[in-house]
Amino acid sequence: MEQLPILSLSVWLPILGGLLVLALGRNRDEMARWLALVVSGVVFLITTLLLVGFDTGTAGMQFVEDRVWIPAFDIHYKLGVDGLSVLLVLLTSLSTVIAVAASWESITRQVPLYMAAFLIMNGLMIGVFSALDAVLFYVFWEAMLIPMFLIIGIWGGPNRIYATIKFFLYTFFGSVLMLVALVYLYAQAGTFDILALHDVQLSLAEQVWIFLAFLIAFAVKVPMWPVHTWLPDAHVEAPTAGSVILAAIMLKMGGYGFLRFSLPITPDASHELAWLVIAVSLVAVVYIGLVALVQEDMKKLVAYSSIAHMGFVTLGYFMFNNQGVAGGLVQMISHGFVSAALFLCIGVMYDRLHTRRISEYGGVANVMPVFAAFFMLFAMANAGLPGTSGFVGEFMVILGAFKVQPWFAVLAATTLILGAAYTLWLYKRVIFGAVTSEKVEREMPPMSVREKWVFAPLAVLVLLMGLWPAPFLEIMDSSVTQLVEQANTTKL
């Protein structure tokens, strides 16, 4: 198993597949759909081999591939995964299959380009989670902006140009600061190897500046308050599958960056400035939760909900204990399932009624009972109901926060109230009651078989992680323990 270059196949097969789909040209829409589905499905099967051969007893990197790329600067093509990244790789490949299937009927314009963009982005995102060289990481990190820029800019809503430019400028600005930090680290260590950078000795002043550069880069991507304003605009304008990938994968890259760079490279600065991250995270949990309550557009409500839930992730990481870090990682995986599912639910309704305004719906359960059941499950998970994946990560973060400062836990726990409030408010007005509009009765047929198959894997995973989280926690346990030790070891 170790001999097969699983990670390289996972990165380059979808990119090559995307180029092949792109080469089909116009008037080959059906072939483009099927080819994209087959390629993304094969990539998902390849990434499952990572779990088959994964050794949960070690915190070291596995499935490592290392080739010299640019000898003059000691830059390598180096890939590998550990307990922090392997589940994110699988989440990426699964989300792409779902995104392709979800777009089957709703996208009718420039289909080969659309499908190619998702396949290429799939490979680039897997590259981000598996890169072990800082330059390689940065190349993947920047390159994945281009397909998403095209997806929102070409197939998005009326204000798509504004949303894409805002999305690009915010994320690109943060990335430039990250590049400056990586170049400085190279000057100190003489290598771009990420694992070697973990051991470089830095003064507190150096650590603080590097930490702040990383913080801005990752905070924009998460996104953390107050650099979050690009996300609701991007979600509202993006096509359904674009919102799925944006919420399920792209936001996770900021959280992953804290684990791979900030905590192990700048542990002293992380402790010194933890108050800043904790404060910003709690503002996201409480304030953004209140903002979600007053939204009239379903996509905006779920977008703000995502920001609040990602605040939980960053809060957990800066508790510097196993429960907090593991809870944040579990919350990232769970949020990938739940947010993707909620955006798909909104997409199913939008495809029928072509509006996202909550006031335009009502009594959907009367005409789409199976859809109402799926939506109920995902809404409960979003509210953190025990027995769903949404509860596990939040409970662990609250537990980790309580060990550090009970008031952190109390403030963080308000998300259980606010999350239930805005999620149930949305669900009640859209799904329950009498049918309030002739359009709902006339233009909302039951779910198709394809739509049920799109929702089924997410429903299973939400329940599996909620009822039996042990396999997920076992995979990440050794790596989380090592990371917590690194984050609590001073370099001064």
Image: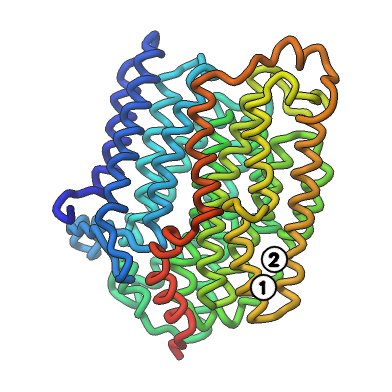
In the image, what residue type sits under mark 1? Leu
Compare residues 266 and 370 and report the one nearer the observer. Answer: 370
Which residue is more in the foreground, 324 or 486? 324
User: 449 or 358: which is nearer to us?
Assistant: 449
- Residue carrying label 2: 280
Q: Does the rendering let one see residue 157?
A: no
Q: Secondary structure at mark 1?
A: helix
The spot of residue 274 in percent (x, y) is: 62, 76
Is 129 rendered above or below residue 324? above
Q: Is residue 348 above or below residue 210?
A: above
Residue 10 in sight = yes
Task: Determine the secondary structure under disc 2.
Answer: helix
Determine which of the numbered discs, if any, sits on residue 11 in the image.
none
Q: Position of residue 120 (x, y in %)?
A: 37, 35
- Image side of residue 127 versus residue 425, left or right: left
In the displayed orientation, state which residue is furthest to the left: 3
Q: Give the residue displayed 55% in from the left and 63% down from the top.
A: 328
CA neighbours of label 1 inside 10 A, class few (<14), some (14 to 19), many (20+): few
- Residue hosting label 1: 276
Mark 2 Cα shell of 10 Å, populated few (<14), some (14-19), many (≥20): some
Does the CB distance between marks 2 and 1 fall below 8 Å? yes
| Residue 179 location (% of width, % of height) | 44, 61
Residue at image location 18% in from the left, 61% down from the top: 71
* Tag count: 2
Query: CA–CA distance between discs 2 and 1?
Result: 6 Å
> What's the amino acid at mark 2?
Val
What colour scheme has been applied to the protein in the rendered image? rainbow
Residue 426's quadrant in the figure? top right
- At x 80%, y 49%, the residue is 421
Name the residue rendered at 64%, 58% in the picture. Answer: 224
Residue 220 in which image quadrant: bottom right
Where 185 falls versus 459 (above or below)?
Answer: below
